[in-house]
Image (tube, rainbow, N blue to C red):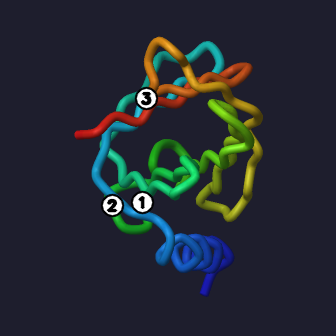
Amino acid sequence: MSKTSSLLLFFLLFTAGTASASEAICEIQASGEAMRSMPCDFSAESDGSFSVQSLRKDGPLYDEILVVSLAMTGKNQGQVSAVTKNGINSRWGAVNRCLSDKACWNGEDFRICVRAK
């Protein structure tokens, strides 16, 4: 089993008992780029934390990114990280919930929105 498959399997097993999954529309904007919109699988935790991944099994959400996760750290605050196809866990940084559009979270140089489909 490859390192990427092992990490993805760990992630799926870790969240399988605690998350509820549903299809959604993910919008991700990285520094200076246009907003990208794609269908995604949204898994929510009871504390408001969540993760999104591609609807295609083992396919990237976008570019080299397999999974994007937001871990709640406080009211309307969180930390975002992602796992790449190469198994690299990259920390994107702190986010604050957008108060005018509660589907969105704003980081220093990125924005993530997850909307019900």
**Is residue 65 visible in this depiction of the protein?**
no
Could you tell me residue 48's position as x and y percent?
54, 47
Could you tell me residue 38's position as x and y percent?
34, 38
Q: Residues within 10 Å of mark 2 (few under 14, many from 20)?
A: few
In front: label 3 or label 1 = 3
**Is residue 97 visible in this depiction of the protein?**
yes
Q: Residue at x 31, y 44 (%)?
A: 24
Q: Nearer the viewer, residue 40 or 62?
A: 40
Q: Is residue 93 left or right of residue 48?
A: right
Query: Looking at the picture, does residue 79 appear above or below residue 17?
Result: above
Q: Residues within 10 Å of mark 1 (few under 14, many from 20)?
A: some
| Count of numbered marks | 3
Q: Residue at x 73, y 20 (%)?
A: 108
Residue type, mark 3 in image = Ala
Quarter of the image containing the N terminus? Answer: bottom right
Q: Is residue 71 left or right of residue 9?
A: right
Pointer 1: what residue? Answer: 59
Q: Quadrant of residue 101?
A: top left
Q: Quadrant of residue 2?
A: bottom right
Q: Can you name the residue that lies furthest to the bottom here?
A: 1
- Asked if the residue at tag 3 contacts the one at tag 2, i.e. Cβ–Cβ closer than 8 Å, the answer is no
Distance from Cα at disc 2 to Cα at disc 3: 23 Å
Distance from Cα at disc 3 to Cα at disc 1: 24 Å
Pointer 2: what residue? Answer: 56
User: Which mark, by number, is residue 103?
Assistant: 3
Q: Is residue 2 left or right of residue 27?
A: right
Residue type, mark 2 in image = Arg
- Asked if the residue at tag 1 contacts the one at tag 2, i.e. Cβ–Cβ closer than 8 Å, the answer is yes
